[in-house]
Structure formats: C-alpha cells, structure tokens
Image (cartoon, rainbow, N blue to C red):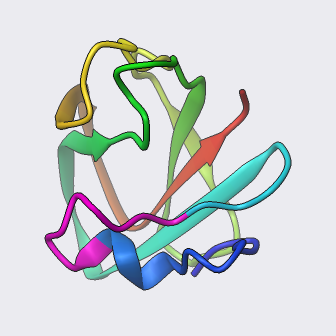
C-alpha cells in the first residue's frame, strides 16, 4: 500500500528486480508493508532509485494496527552513493506494519 504512484506501482518494490521501482509525485510520499504478524524489526534494506546521484530523506515508522504509526530512529538519509541496497540499522522494534515516508 502507498499514498499514490506515478505509474511505478508499490508491488514493484517486492519483485526482487532493482530495475523496477515505486515512485510518487510530491512529498511526503509513503509506502507501507504488512509483515503478516507482529515481529521484530532490526534492519531495513532500501535500494533508492538514482541512489548514486541523490540523497533521500526519510522516516521509518511501525504499527501494530496499520493506523497508528510510531517513528523509529534510523539514519534518516540515504548515502547518495549507490543504487544497490542500503542497510539501515534500527533499534529492535516489534510491529506488523512498516511505513517508509520519503520527505525529501
């Protein structure tokens, strides 16, 4: 689920293909994942489109009901150095839903 798309749909983020992507016009834009049940979240891997040319500012949030989200501390900014996966270590947090909100 996401708050929109520009033709690059959210499902593209789960196809194991770094040549596809989700994107949405405007900020903030968010994408949300249902993990099926509450489970520990300790790392989040994100591959950013044109990630070697620009930095993205973002927030990672978790929820158990899919409605009330709590931000969890993370670096909050991509490196701007790679189009591959970047790992963001987060404090161990339990949650069923995870939302990534891109703010810039």
**Residue for point 73% across, 33% down:** 103
The residue depicted at 56 percent of the width and 78 percent of the height is 65
Q: Is residue 15 left or right of residue 76?
A: left
Q: Is residue 53 above or below residue 5?
A: above
Residue extending furthest toward the right: 26
Image side of residue 84 versus residue 54, left or right: left
Viewer-nearest residue: 44 or 84: 84
Q: Which residues are magenta?
A: 14-22
List x then y, in percent, for residue 16.
14, 71
The quadrant holding residue 45 is top left
Q: Is residue 102 magenta?
A: no
Q: Nearer the viewer, residue 16 or 76?
A: 16
**Residue shown at 39%/40% (left/top)?**
48
Q: Is residue 13 above or below residue 34?
A: above
Residue 13 picture location, percent across and down:
34, 69
Occupied quadrant, residue 56: top right
Q: Is residue 36 left or right of residue 2?
A: left
């Amino acid at each position: 689920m996401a708050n929109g798309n520009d033709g690059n749909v959210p499902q593209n983020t789960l196809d194991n293909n770094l040549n596809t992507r989700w994107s949405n016009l405007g900020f903030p834009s968010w994408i949300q994942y249902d993990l099926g049940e509450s489970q520990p979240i300790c790392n989040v891997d994100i591959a950013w489109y044109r990630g070697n040319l620009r930095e993205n500012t973002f927030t990672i949030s978790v929820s158990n009901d899919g409605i009330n989200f709590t931000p969890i501390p993370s670096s909050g900014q991509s490196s701007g150095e790679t189009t591959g996966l970047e790992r963001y270590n987060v404090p161990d947090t339990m949650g069923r839903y995870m939302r990534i909100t891109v703010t810039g």
